[in-house]
Amino acid sequence: MRESYYDSYYKAEKDHWWFKVRRELVHFLINKYSALDVVNSNLEILDVGCGTGVLTGELERYGRASGIDFSYKAVEYCKERGLKNVVQGVGEKLPYNDNQFDVVLVLDVLEHIEDDKKAIKELHRVLKPDGILISFVPAFMILWGITDEVSQHFRRYTKSELVSKLKESDFKIIRSTYFNTFLFPPILFVRLISRLIPNKYKPEDETRLGNRFINKVFYYIFKFESILLHKINFPFGVSLAVISKKSSGDNRLTENGY
């Protein structure tokens, strides 16, 4: 990801519709699938690719939250937010002990890593037995657009592709679903049309907050969808979520066991 991207990311992360609902969805998934004691939270959580740290700060409600990002600028922004357990590093070589974390988040990160299989093996290594991995990635190469280029993505995923890679590293799949489904048609339309537009007329960054009314409309659309995600899976979407488990031999949780 370009370093200049983090300036707009820092400004947008707190209030942009995408980041707001994504954080709310993450909290639901942690509460749903982790061994969380809501009264005496003491989870060890790692946010891989923590960006400028809004979510990482919120994760401290569950216990001890750590963050890592390959960008020096992102780590500095995290420090501005008062976060202490954030370091610079890469997903292919995490500077943590084996079996250290109860929950690991890798939210829109794997697509940035050329050797994503190596990164997935590292995620498995640092998780405790029965630990939960929450993975979000962008879906479907047909949606490739300016955000993928600016963010220096290597790929967008299908569900079968990501699930296969997780299973290769001995993760047990608990749940897999596409999301950001309601906005899939307009986003697909915009992405296809943008391919006909000369590069000099394309926006440089789709994460800017933009019109506040539009931001609020998108927030409530995505918010409504995220509520439905509490109970159902979607067959397609702009993004993909996979919740998986580092097995310890107890396989009571099974895919879609929500």
Image (tube, rainbow, N blue to C red):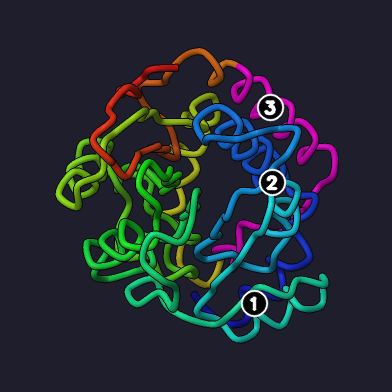
Crowd tier of the residue under label 1, counting other residues whose Cα lies within 10 Å: few below 14, some 14–19, many 20 or above? many
Disc 2 residue crowd, few under 14, some 14–19, many 20+, Cα 10 Å: many
* Amino acid identity at mark 2: Tyr
Label at residue 223: 3
The answer to which of marks 2 and 1 sits earlier in the sequence is 2
Q: Which residues are magenta?
A: 202-227
| Residue 49 can be seen, yes or no | yes
Image coordinates of residue 91 in percent, x first then y, are 39, 71
Q: Secondary structure at mark 3?
A: helix
Q: Position of residue 208 (x, y in %)?
A: 71, 59
User: Which residue carries the number 2 mark?
Assistant: 62
* Magenta residue check for 137: no
Q: Which residue is under mark 1? A: 74
One can see residue 192 in this view = no
Measure how far apart labels 2 and 1 are at the Cα level. Answer: 23 Å
Residue 22 % position (x, y): 62, 41
Residue occupying image coordinates x 32% and y 73% = 92
Q: What kind of residue is marked 1?
A: Ala
- Cα distance between the residues tagged 1 and 3: 27 Å
